[in-house]
Image: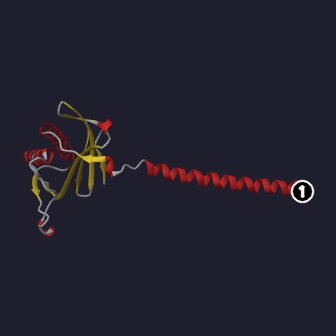
Amino acid sequence: MNRLFVSAQVIAIASARALSSAIALAMLLTGLSGCATVPKEQELASSPVSVELGNSLASDAVKQLQTLYPPAQTTFNIDQALSKTDSFGNALVVQLRAKGYAVQIIDPQQPANAVTGIGLHYTVDTPAARWYIGLYRVQLVVGKTTLTRAYSEANNTALPAGAWAKLE
């Protein structure tokens, strides 16, 4: 009887060790799977867009900004250079001003205390993989809030591929 009791204890200890090892392995795999789903910046490439597509993307972006920030009471400070070939950025500035927003393009040399309003930074990019041709992402960083939306393109028109996502 004593020998049976000792064997049962050994089996119980071995089972407990196997169970704790299985739990540790499951936790490790769960943690690693979370890392696998985080997109990497190199998976996206900055993408110049046509004038028509830039206007379409900017129009939708302005509609979203109108729902969050009242025109005639909001000043946006664009804190990046606008080139003549930046169709989205130029269309965004024109359309924001047409809706009643004050828009300033901030010179990085300007002292920070001389600037009033909310910072606005934008990105238009596309997945770097070849099989995602025609997909675009617009990301607006307004102050500390990030707004993002995906689009597909058809005939130089932006078609929303999902809802706006907001990260505060």
The residue most toward the front is 130
Residue 7 percent coordinates (x, y) = 84, 54
Residue 141 percent coordinates (x, y) = 24, 53
Q: Residues within 10 Å of mark 1 (few under 14, many from 20)?
A: few
In the displayed structure, would residue 50 be above or below residue 109? above
Secondary structure, mark 1, is helix
Pick the residue in front: 3 or 147: 3
Q: Residue at x 8, y 46 (%)?
A: 94
Image quarter in which the N terminus is found: bottom right
Residue 67 percent coordinates (x, y) = 21, 45
Q: Residue at x 12, y 39 (%)?
A: 51
Residue 55 percent coordinates (x, y) = 13, 40
Per the image, the residue denoted by label 1 is: 3
Q: Residue at x 10, y 54 (%)?
A: 103
Q: Is residue 39 left or right of residue 48?
A: right
Image quarter in which the C terminus is found: bottom left
Pick the residue in front: 85 or 152: 85
The residue most toward the top is 155
Chosen colour scheme: secondary structure
Q: Residue at x 80, y 56 (%)?
A: 9
